[in-house]
Image (cartoon, rainbow, N blue to C red):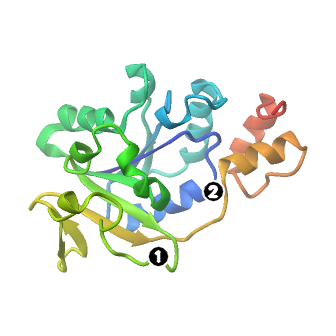
Amino acid sequence: MKWGLLGGTFDPIHIGHLRCAEEVLEIFDLNRIIFVPASLPPHKLDAQITPFYHREQMVKLAIEENPGFSFSDVENQRGGKSYSVETIEYFLEKYLSELELYMILGQDAFHAIQTWRDWEKLLLLCNFVIMTRPGYVNHGLSGIVPPDFAAQFQYDEKVQGFRASERYAIFFREVTFLDISSSNIRQRVSQGKSIKYLVPDPVRRYIVKNGLYGNL
C-alpha cells in the first residue's frame, strides 16, 4: 500500500488543497491520500479555529466523490496538541510493513520544519513530498536544516529525491499553484463576498447553512 498523508487545519478546505493532492496522488501513483485535519495545531494555539466537527464535515464533503481520497480523525481522537510525528507513528504502527507512507507538505511548511516537534526524527520516519511553486530553486535540504543533518541526505537520480536511507526519501515536486488561502476565504465570507469556485460547492453550501465565518 502506498498512502499519502495530507495534514492541515482545513478551515476551510479549498480547491487548492484538492488540486495539489490530486497531482501528488498521480505523480507517485499512490493508492490513496488521507486528509488529516489537526485538532489542536501547535502553531496556531492563539488562533480562533472552527470546531473540529465542522472542519471534519467540510473535508468529507470535499472528497466524497474522489475514490483516491479518504479522511482520518486520528488527531482529534488522540486529543491534546496535534503533532505530525505522533500521527505518522500511529499509521506506521497500525499497518506495519504493509504500508509505504508519504507525508505531504507545502513548501512554506517544510521551510519551517525546525519548529516542529521532534523534526529530526520526523524526517527519518517515512517519505516526504514537498510541494513547490513554479520557479522554486531546489537546493535540497541546504539552508532549511542544519548542515550536519542535511549531510545525511544524498540525491538519488533514480528516484529524483534525497535519500538518508534505502527506504525513504524527500521529494521536491512542482504542483499547480492556486493562490487560494483559507484565511482569505474566511475573510470573504465575513464580508459577504462570494467564495464560489474557491471551495467545492458542497463546502460552500455547508458554510452558508451553518453560518460559519460570519462574525470574524
Does 148 appear above or below 188? below
Helix or strand or loop: what does disc 1 sit on? loop
Image coords of residue 73 (percent x, y)? 44, 29
Q: Position of residue 28 (x, y in %)?
A: 32, 65
* Residue at horizontal 47 percent and vertical 32 percent from the top: 42
Local SS, label 2: helix
Residue 15: image tag: 2
Residue at image point 63% right, 39% down: 11
Residue 1: image tag? none
Relative depth, front residue between 49 and 71: 49
Q: Looking at the picture, which amino acid does disc 1 mark?
A: Tyr
Circle 1 residue: 136
Disc 1 and disc 2: Cα gap in Å?
21 Å
Residue positioned most to the left: 166
Residue 1 drawn above or below residue 55: below
Amino acid type of disc 2?
Ile
Q: Position of residue 46 (x, y in %)?
A: 61, 29
The relative height of residue 147 versus residue 54 in the rendered view (above or below) is below
How would you rate the neighbour count of disc 1 (Cα within 10 Å): few for under 14, some for 14-19, many for 20 or more?
Answer: few
Residue 204 coordinates in the image, percent (x, y):
75, 44
Q: Which corner quadrant of the image does residue 169 belong to? A: bottom left
Q: Is residue 199 left or right of residue 152?
A: right
Q: Nearer the viewer, mark 1 or mark 2?
A: 1
Vertically, is 132 above or below 41? Answer: below
